[in-house]
Structures are given as structure tokens and as C-alpha cells.
Image: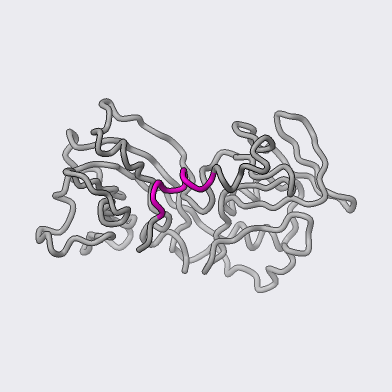
Amino acid sequence: MAVIQGGSRSYVPALTAPFARNIRLNCPVQRIRRDAQGVSIISQQGEERFDKVILACHSDQALNLLEQPSDAEQAILGAIRYADNDVVLHTDTSLLPSRRLAWASWNYRLGGDQNNPAALTYNMNILQGIQAPETFCVSLNQTEHIDPSRILARFNYAHPSSARPRAPPSSNGKHCLATRTPFSAAPGGPTVSMKMAWSAHCALPRTSGSASDEPRQRTLQRPTAAPPASAARAPVPLPDYPAAARSG
């Protein structure tokens, strides 16, 4: 797996430089109102008019933002279920396979109740090419097995669930593209990613989510102690596709 040195921090500033002054942070969109002439965006900045709006957020977020969503939008965006996942960044290698030669980027825990959330551990040193004396792991839904003294940070994220949708998404999804609010879907599935571009010149203000196509962060518990220096040299973003979370 190829990883760009420095991660997204190394290329996002260069990509956004031409319109950096128009990026709005901490300015959540409250409502999107559409009419025949264009789209109104309601936020703490007030009401602003645009020709079109691209919604690149989770499908349930998109549906909640739309004022008077169509029947097709309710059927498609409302069909996708979400599940909370307890996510922990830690250095407890006991959650990896007992044989070191079996360590992989993704390490699943099998044999549990099939109704339970997916349980797996990412070996971030392998996944991100981290050279460090410690092995950094990100585990989903296995907090009770982790040595508390080895925990660096804990999060709760909502991911699209692999459970059967409430109703099969309509095959006439092109209806959504015919409106003034097209939706940006992740490759291989109906998941809607996580940023909103207001226009070509007012790009990518963040709502309550994080970076594009990443899991939506609900809460954050900060670690009681600072991570080791080796971790600071190599920021560890949470992986994009947790097991059984995204379709495709």
C-alpha cells in the first residue's frame, strides 16, 4: 500500500491554496432550501444564495439538511443504516495475532456473536509505514481487551452499517442528480462522503464531520497522558474503511 509521506497534511494545503480564504471552519450548515432559481444555504452566517450545492456528507446528515426532500431522496438517503463503533488508539499488541509473522494491516477477531459490531485491529506501523519502537494499533469494539495503561486516545465513530438497508435504494438515483443539490457518493456504494462545497469559489466548509470519506466523529475523549514522541512524528489518521462499515 502506497502512503504519501506526511499524510494529508502534506498535500491538502497545496490543493486548497487558491481558495483557502474562502474555506469556512466551525460554520455548520443548518438548512438547505431549494427553488427553481437556485439554492439557499442557512447557517450562522445567515442565508446565502448559490446556483447549486454539492452535498458530500453522510446520507443521514444530507437528508436532515434538506428542507422538503423529495420522495426519492428520502427513499435513497434514508435507506442506509449507521452503527456506532468504539475506536481506540493504543500500543497493546496482545490484540494482534499471537504469531508475529501473522501480523497484518487489518487483523480481525473471529468467532464472536455475529450480531455484535465488527471487531478488528489495524496495525498502523504496517498500514502507514511507521518506523518506531512501539507498535501503534487502532482497535474497533474491543476496548475491554486493551490494557488501559496502553491507551493513547479513544473515539466514538458512526459508520455506514453492512446491515440490510431499511429498503433497497431506488434505482432511479439519477433523480438526485437532476436537482440543484447533487450528492457525492463513495466509490462502490451509496455512502455519501463528508464535506460540502458551496460553489467553485466558496469551497469545502466543514459541517459537523471530518475529512472527506472518513467516518463521522461523534465524541472524543482525550488521553490523560501525551502520546510518545514517536507517535508525534507520524500522525496516525483513522483508517478510511473499517470492516463491514462501508459498502464495496
In this rendering, position of residue 117 left or right of residue 165: left
212 in magenta: no
Give, as a single range, the part of the protein colored magenta: 4-12
Residue lying farthest to the bottom in this orientation = 171
Q: Residue at x 23, y 62 (%)?
A: 104
Q: Position of residue 50 (x, y in %)?
A: 81, 45
Of residues 236 and 98, the one nearer the viewer is 236
Residue 25 location, quadrant: top right
Q: Which residue is drawn at 57% across and 66% down?
A: 167
In this rendering, position of residue 101 left or right of residue 114: left
Q: Position of residue 178 (x, y in %)?
A: 78, 64
Of the 4 image quadrants, the one containing the N terminus is bottom left
Residue 46 location, quadrant: top right
Q: Position of residue 80 (x, y in %)?
A: 54, 59
Q: Where is residue 169 in the image (x, y as percent from the top left)?
A: 60, 68
> Looking at the image, is 43 positioned above or below residue 71?
above
Q: Residue at x 29, y 54 (%)?
A: 129
